[in-house]
Every structure is written in structure tokens, then in C-alpha cells.
Image: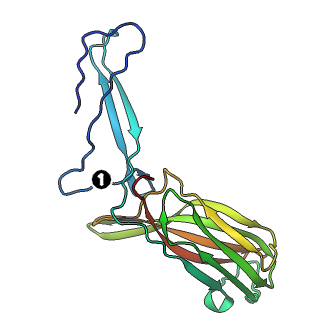
Amino acid sequence: MLILCVSSTPDGVTELPFEFRLEPLSGQQLQETYHGIYVNVQYLITVDLTGSLLGRNLQEVLLFFVECPNTAKLVPSPESFVITPEGIELAPTKKSSKPIPRFKMSGRIDSKTCSITQPFTGHIIIEECEATIKSIELQLLRIETVGSAEGFSKERTEIQNIQIGDGDVPRNFQIDIHMIFPRLFSCRTVQERTYKVEFGVTLVVLFEDGRNITEDFPVYLVREWGT
């Protein structure tokens, strides 16, 4: 608790500068501000004004953000990929029981270890595809694991979805991948004893008949010093 004692103030706006060191509890470490479904990390400042002229105390609660850089240096981990019918299982919808169309899609993820302040980047190329493509999308997922006396519960939920290709895109054309990590709903990857917060990106190719192809890429988010 920080106490500022002021006997009187002049008319107008009076600023009272203050600062304090944010330190973790014994045996713990600070975690970044994060708003999830099952895991939430929030930091609040409660300001109390006593001795008010109105005859009652005033109180205000403010939320502030905490960012915790990693100690290790970011090491890029690029990955190339090829998607073919032999490597995936395409589940037909209730409206369509057609066989899996012939297709080949290739691309590259620039790094699966990502700086949270930099975009997730790469590209995809539709080399061939018999079916008509409706859309190509990127989904950012959070994977929250929470422990309790009964065991661990793991849940995947979607944070955001962006479209990188609209309609039956040209074949052999490089489509760039560019996704910004949202500040409030993402944080550096956390792996604690009782909970984990991990992230992944899913590439989704939607066909006009309602079927889709998905490819998952686990990503490890870090925060570098000075970013």
C-alpha cells in the first residue's frame, strides 16, 4: 500500500507523482496481463481518497497492463508444408458425400516461435485443386490447460479469424500470410505447474460444397526485451 498525505491543494488540477516496484509473491513469478476463457491475469490499482469535502471517501479502480519479457533470445523456427489428400482426412458434410477432390497446396511458415509484437507471417500456394474454393482463412487459437484436484482440463477456443483468400483463388499464386497477435487476448506462452496458456494457428481452406481442409501449426509466443 502506498499512502500520499496532502493537507491542502490549490484550486485547479493537482498532480501527485508516484511510483512503486511490482514484485511477485514469494515462490512465484509475474505473469503478463491476459484475458482468456478459463485463465485470466489482471493487475489493478485501487485509489482511495479520504477526507473528501463531500463528507465521504472516494474510490477508483484502474486496470493496468503488465508485459514480461523472456530471458531467452528469440530463435526463428521456419517450417515448410505440403497439403495433399493423402495427408489429411476430409470429412464430408451432411449435404455432400463426394469423394475427396485432388489437390496440392504448399507453403511456408516463417517461424513457429514468434515475437508477440511482430506479425505471424508466411505464404500458401494452391498448386492444383479440382474443387471450387470459397475462402482461405487463418484462425488464431488459445489452448488453456487448468489443473485441479480432479485432474487437468484442456480447452481450445478461437481468438480471431481473418480471411487471406476470397473465392476460387488463382493456382500457383503466392498468397501471403499476415496475422497480428491481439494485445488483450494473447500473451507470451505460459507453462506453469497448475495451468498453461498456449497458442496455435489453423489454416482453413473452405470449398463451395461446405467441406473444408484444416492444417494446424502450434506457435510459441515470446516477448523480447525492448519490444
- Against 160, residue 219 (above or below) is below
Quadrant into which the N terminus falls: top left
Residue type for callout 1: Leu
The residue drawn where x is 60% and y is 61% is 179
x and y percent of residue 188 in the render?
Answer: 42, 60
Neighbour tally class for label 1: few under 14, some 14-19, many 20 plus, Cα within 10 Å: few
Between 92 and 204, the residue placed more toward the observer is 204
Q: Name the residue under label 1.
A: 30
Left or right of residue 54: residue 92: right
- Against 147, residue 26 (above or below) is above
The residue drawn where x is 66% and y is 83% is 91
x and y percent of residue 191 in the render?
Answer: 34, 66
x and y percent of residue 194 in the render?
Answer: 29, 65
Left or right of residue 93: residue 109: left
Q: Is mark 1 on a helix, strand or loop?
A: loop
Between 106 and 87, the residue placed more toward the observer is 106
Q: In which quarter of the image is residue 220?
A: bottom left
In the displayed orientation, state which residue is furthest to the top. 11
Q: Can residue 176 be seen in this view?
A: yes
Q: Can residue 208 be seen in this view?
A: no
x and y percent of residue 26 in the render?
Answer: 17, 53
Between 96 and 143, the residue placed more toward the observer is 143
Q: In which quarter of the image is residue 62?
A: top left
